[in-house]
Structure formats: structure tokens, C-alpha cells
Amino acid sequence: MNVAYLSIGSNIGDRLSYLKEAVRILNADDDISVSAVSSIYETAPVGFTEQADFLNIVCRIETKLDASSLLAVCQDIEKELGRVREVRWGPRTVDLDILLYNNENIEMKNLTIPHPRMQERAFVLIPLLEIAPMVIHPVSKKPFSEEAAVHDDGVSLWKKVGVEQFI
Ligand code: GSY
């Protein structure tokens, strides 16, 4: 079985419902089981800053899918939940990014793992380190906690929840 970590964010409409729905749909897939979900964090937008704050989580999944098929599932969920790709880095009902897939370094045309910007993003690192404090960067082999100084700028705990409240 493969283990992957996904970052999920929402900053339009009922943000919590979009996060919950994304996790529920993931877990309903016969080839995916969600095994951990971080607390929910409210986070200042990164990239295009003139937009609403996000709610972000990171979840751990076990899956029989290869990384490309997992990407396709994530994109289908984004479509199903109404994401329209209008502005690059812009507002979205829901966004699912694959952060890590096993200990693999994957470089394909449409998919890079580890996610290339994850080390710069407190909205990814803080929830990731909450559920996987010892996780190692597949290339540098250092723990993420050492890989980048983890600043909590713009990231605050919004709600502490358990995986059972998502699935
Ligand atoms: O890459 C994920 C979408 N995204 C986010 C996000 O999820 N959270 C925050 N805080 N800023 C973001 N900018 C982008 S793009």
C-alpha cells in the first residue's frame, strides 16, 4: 500500500463544508483510505494576496493508486466541488495538492512530488508536521522540521478535529 500526504484548502463559500466534502469523497474511493487529518487552520493567502483567507488541512491517505491516478482523483474532486480555474493562484472552492507520495521523487510533465513549493508554505508545513512530525524530505533526507524554518506567519488554529469528524 502507498502512503501519501495531501494539502486541501478552500477560500470561497462554506469553506469547512468544502474541506469535509473533499475528505469524504477521497475516503469513499475504493482505492483510498484516509488515515489522519490535521486540525483546521485559517491561513492568510499566499501568492495572490488580494483574496479571502483560506481554511487549510493536511491529510494522510493509504492508496493502491499510483501518483498519476491519485492526481486524476484530486482533479475530479476539485471539478465536482465546483472549482473553476479562472485566476492563477486565485480564489477556489477547493484545492487538493499531492505533497508526498511514499518516499518518492517524481518528476512528470504535470506532476512534481515532493510538491515544489511545500517548504515555503507555512499553511502546508504546520498541518503536515502536526500529523507527521518525523516526515523526511525524500531528496535531502532531512526531516521537514529542519528542512525549512517553519514560521507560523498568517497561520492560526481554527478548529481541532479528529479524522472521524471528516469521514
Ligand atoms: O496551493 C493551494 C492553494 N493556495 C493557497 C492555500 O491553500 N492557502 C493559502 N493560505 N494560500 C494559498 N495560495 C494558494 S495558490
Image (spheres, rainbow, N blue to C red):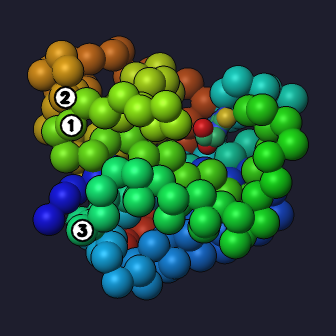
User: Which residue is depicted at the point 30% across and 64% down?
Assistant: 65
The label nearer to you, 2 versus 3, is 3
* Structural distance between the alpha carbons of marks 2 and 3: 20 Å
The reply to whether the C-beta atoms of the residues labelled 2 and 1 are less than 8 Å apart is: yes
Corner quadrant of residue 94 = bottom right
Image x and y of residue 72, in percent = 51, 59
Image x and y of residue 4, in percent = 29, 53
User: Which residue is depicted at the point 33% across and 73% down?
Assistant: 32
Q: Is residue 73 above or below residue 42?
A: below
User: What residue would you read off at disc 1?
Assistant: 104
> Where residue 64 is drawn, which disc sits there?
3
* Structural distance between the alpha carbons of marks 3 and 1: 15 Å
User: What residue would you read off at disc 2?
Assistant: 138
Q: Is residue 77 above or below residue 155?
A: below
Residue 42 appears in the figure: yes
Given the image, on which type of amino acid does mark 3 rest?
Lys
Given the image, on which type of amino acid does mark 2 rest?
Pro
Given the image, on which type of amino acid does mark 1 rest?
Glu
User: Which residue is depicted at the point 76% across and 50% down?
Assistant: 92
> Where residue 10 is drawn, which disc sits there?
none
Relative horizontal placement of residue 144, taking residue 150 as reference (left or right): left
- Closest to the observer, 49 or 3: 3
Tag count: 3
Quarter of the image that includes the C terminus: bottom left
Corner quadrant of residue 161 = bottom left
The disc, 2 or 1, on the residue closer to the chain's N-terminal end is 1
Q: Residues within 10 Å of mark 1 (few under 14, many from 20)?
A: some
